[in-house]
């Protein structure tokens, strides 16, 4: 058996064309969704992510602004820019590309973004709202995974769901969204004892570790749904996920890397920006 590939690229295109339609109807009312993306420094991976976000804005008919600060920028300078964007009527969503240089506190920057414009859903106010299940914005990567599960009619209800990784941007919110959908959720991390055994019990296994080939076939139950969130580079410099390719032979459904969870993340950012524009008018 070889797993069905969960095509995040195709689903993204479908969702983006729906967003474009909705943008056009908003434009007829004089509303243009606007996203500001801030990049600090010249990290090549971050530059690619920012470029892809700008491209997605164009595809969805949004107004977008890119603000680039030097790697030497101070926290005060960055927060001053965020305050300006918080007040800008053209901007509905603000995204500050992470990671930031060491002299800038990510927590302080996230807290400075107006929660109504926090389209990454990283602000503590939005994180709290996700926890209690009363939210406007969902964090983009976990939200994209949920859309992929829905597209392939995979219902987490009652299923054993295992998330490897407990970061604030992926692991924790991923676990929360699966819980909202009635999954029985276990979160694993670097101190988990006998991690392969815990993973091998999962009906739905989400890997958000950041280590190429971390999930091997012995960690996967026959017929499990495997979601690979990882974006790594292998020894040849090729982009690859956290899940070893041989897992394809054991899983029932699996997301490829690239082309699975990655494109959905940016699409969910567009969805949040559209929603922010609606809510702000
Ligand atoms: P972090 O480094 O913040 O978190 C990694 C998590 O993996 C931590 O919770 C860590 O545990 C856990 N971990 C690390 N090593 C082990 C191990 N040996 N055994 C068990 N758990 C381990 O990463 P992110 O959550 O930010 O990202 C994870 C991956 O997802 C990365 O590859 C990243 O590039 C990718 N990513 C992809 C996105 C997309 O658009 N598809 C968006 C965001 C991220 P502990 O907490 O104990 O240290």
Image (cartoon, grey):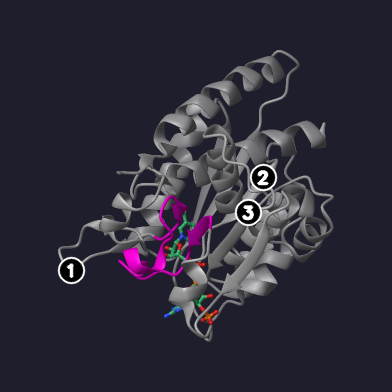
**Mark 3 and mark 1: Cα distance apart in space:** 35 Å
Position in image of residue 258 (x %, y %): 33, 48
> Which callout, 3 or 2, points to the residue nearer the camera?
3
In the rendered image, residue 60 lying in the magenta stretch gets the answer no
Q: Is residue 218 magenta?
A: yes
Q: Secondary structure at mark 1?
A: loop
Range of residues picked out in magenta: 203-230
Q: Which residue is mark 1?
A: 235
- Relative image position of residue 159 (x, y in whole percent): 63, 54
As drawn, is 72 to the left or to the right of 119? left
CA distance for labels 3 and 2:
35 Å
Q: Which residue lies under the disc numbered 2?
A: 93
Which type of secondary structure does the marked residue at label 3 adopt? loop
Q: Earlier in the sequence, mark 2 or mark 1?
A: 2
Identify the element where label 2 is drawn.
strand
At 73% from the left and 19% from the top, the residue drawn is 30
In this image, 158 relative to 206: left or right?
right
- Marks 3, 1: nearer the viewer: 3
Q: Is residue 170 visible?
A: no
Give the residue at mark 3. 159
Image quarter in which the C terminus is found: top right
């Amino acid at each position: 058996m070889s797993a069905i590939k969960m095509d995040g690229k195709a689903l993204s295109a479908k969702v983006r064309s729906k967003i474009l339609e909705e943008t056009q109807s908003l434009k007829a009312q004089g509303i243009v969704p606007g996203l500001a993306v801030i990049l600090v420094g010249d990290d090549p991976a971050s530059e690619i992510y920012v470029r892809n976000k700008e491209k997605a804005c164009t595809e969805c008919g949004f107004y977008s602004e890119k603000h680039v600060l030097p790697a030497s920028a101070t926290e005060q300078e960055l927060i001053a820019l965020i305050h300006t964007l918080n007040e800008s009527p053209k901007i509905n969503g603000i995204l500050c590309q992470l990671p930031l240089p060491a002299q800038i506190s990510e927590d302080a920057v996230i807290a400075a973004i107006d929660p109504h414009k926090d389209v990454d859903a990283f602000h503590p106010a939005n994180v709290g709202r996700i926890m209690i299940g009363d939210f406007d914005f969902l964090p983009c990567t976990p939200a994209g995974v949920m859309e992929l599960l829905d597209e392939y009619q995979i219902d987490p209800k009652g299923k054993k769901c295992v998330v490897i990784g407990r970061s604030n941007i992926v692991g924790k919110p991923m676990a929360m969204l699966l819980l909202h959908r009635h999954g029985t959720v276990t979160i694993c991390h670097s101190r988990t004892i006998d991690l392969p055994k815990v993973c091998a019990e999962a009906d739905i296994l989400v890997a958000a570790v950041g280590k190429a080939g971390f999930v091997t076939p012995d960690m996967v139950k026959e017929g499990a749904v495997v979601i690979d969130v990882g974006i790594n580079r292998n020894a040849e410099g090729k982009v690859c996920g956290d899940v070893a390719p041989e897992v394809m032979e054991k899983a029932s459904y699996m997301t490829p890397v690239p082309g699975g969870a990655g494109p959905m993340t940016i699409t969910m950012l567009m969805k949040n920006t559209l929603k922010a524009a609606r809510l702000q008018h």
